[in-house]
Image (cartoon, rainbow, N blue to C red):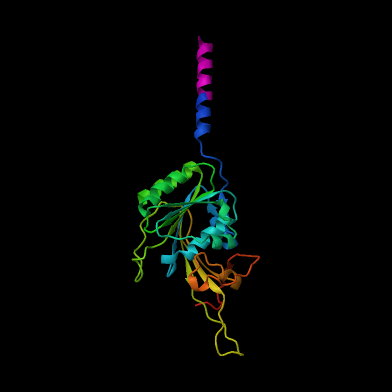
Amino acid sequence: MAQENHDTLRLLREQVARIERQHAAPHVSGTLPTGTPVIDTHLGGGLRRGAVHEIVGTGADRLTGVRPTRFVATILARATGHIVWVRGAGTDLCLTGLRQLGLSPGRLILVETAPDQVGPLAEDILRERGILAMVADLTAPMTLTATRRLQLAAEKGGVTGFLIHQADGSVRRGQPPPLPASACQTRWQVGAAPCVLPFSTSSRTPLPGPAHWQVDLLRQRGGPAASWTFEISDDDATLPLRMVAPVADRSVATSPSRHLHLVRPGSACA
């Protein structure tokens, strides 16, 4: 009788172990490198995988989301795997721009839904297996409860989530309302930064200088915030993700490197 009980207990333990293996989250390596050494060092290697990260724009990027989108696209271009990109009605995504940033459109699964369904759909996608990341374009910030649900879904599915805030057309002037509390792993603010135009003695007209980005890590769970100003080369500046009609036919130079270059203290930047 004792031997039979022992064998039964062993079989039950083996069955439980099989069930746990079937429902366990897939193994995910620790981080997604951003490709910018100073940021990766601050984050301990990069953005945590199997977590959700928020990105909000400043200035014109509050409406267009160009720089936040490029920030996410260049990170995902460095990794492998499929990406589900969820968009609300009325948003736009330039696949040519993504390709120029190194992100192949063949890796994307584009999903369009009603704006109020982006959050629930994003949660379902984060629970799926076999994809690298989920990117959602939001027209309104999510509540603390909603982001907590997304974070738990990402941890269970092992999928990395990115929430890109893009205000609707009714928000055009004035200071944006404060963002609500969030359970996301990190919250970023990405936008343009002013710089001093270089002056040539042979011309009375200042020449356009390299574009500057301001990248602020507003918060991260278990770590300090930080702020950086980066410089984009002239070639990189010709790679917008959403191209307006006047520059749609502008020739684009190929750049061997699309890294952000840190602007050191004391450089010509306002």
Residue 258 relative to residue 222: left or right: right
**Vertical side of 20 occupied by 249: above or below:** below
**Is residue 44 something one can see in this rendering?**
no
Residue 269 relative to residue 150: left or right: right
Between residue 155 and residue 135, name the one nearer to us.
135
* Displayed quadrant of residue 63: bottom left
Between residue 208 and residue 149, name the one nearer to us.
208
- The image position of residue 180, as x and y in percent, is 35, 57
- The image position of residue 54, as x and y in percent, is 45, 56
The secondary structure making up most of the magenta span is helix
Outermost residue, top direction?
1
Q: Is residue 66 magenta?
A: no
Write the residue at 50% across / 19% down. Answer: 9
> Which portion, as a residue range, is magenta?
1-14
Write the residue at 51% across / 36% down. Answer: 24
Between residue 126 and residue 231, name the one nearer to us.
126
- The image position of residue 256, as x and y in percent, is 66, 65
**Is residue 86 something one can see in this rendering?**
yes
Write the residue at 55% across / 80% down. Answer: 208
Q: Is residue 7 magenta?
A: yes
Between residue 127 and residue 3, name the one nearer to us.
127
